[in-house]
Image (tube, grey):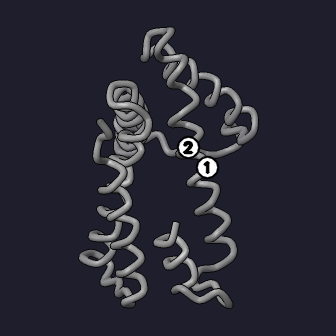
Amino acid sequence: MLGVFGLATHFSLSELVISPLGLFWGTMAAISVVVYTLIPISLMLKYPKLSVIGFGMLVGGIVFTIYLQPWKFVVPTDSVSLWALFGMVFIGTVFSFSSFLIGVSIVGPVIGGLIAGLEAVASLIFSIILLGQTFTIQDLVSIALVMSSIVILSFKKD
């Protein structure tokens, strides 16, 4: 928690160094990770894993189709666009999310969540290398605190 606090405030109680909108969406992302990691575990212990994942994606797809009404948009249908869509849907969503949930059902939600935290490390490295992002000492200390908590929590209690 101290690391996240440091990233959001640079350890100052009087100001945010991120936008309120960024704070809102970061909080929503954290809640979402907890929800989609913990809710399906009991279902996947009772029913086949791929059936639970498929049903969840079907329900989500129906809800968002009704909400977003994609038939109102003009979508390019050239081969490049269709291959890109195929890649996003099957590789970027179905395969990756199924792999994550199956992995979580094997190692447990805590370890699965900790491993998923490595995504933040990759984002940090790519933002430095590819985007030339710079970080303050407060940012680096905060990142070290977050990463150390992941390492500490990953040690199995006997």
Give the residue type at disc 2.
Val
Q: Which residue is mark 2?
A: 34
Q: How many marks?
A: 2
Q: Are marks 1 and 2 in contact (CB under 8 Å)?
A: yes
Q: Position of residue 154 (x, y in %)?
A: 31, 48
Q: Is residue 21 above or below residue 62?
A: below
Q: Residue at x 41, y 82 (%)?
A: 139
Q: Residue furthest left?
A: 129
- Alpha-carbon span between mark 1 and mark 2: 5 Å
Q: Is residue 151 above or below residue 54?
A: below
Determine which quarter of the picture holds residue 40. Answer: top right
Q: Which residue is mark 1?
A: 31
Taking the image as shown, residue 47 lies to the left or right of residue 118, namely right
Q: Position of residue 106 (x, y in %)?
A: 33, 25
Q: Residue at x 71, y 31 (%)?
A: 63
Give the residue type at disc 1.
Ile
Quarter containing the C terminus: top left
Q: Is residue 157 visible?
A: yes
Q: Which mark is residue 69?
A: none
Front residue of this view, candidates 76 and 121 = 121
Q: Position of residue 142 (x, y in %)?
A: 42, 76
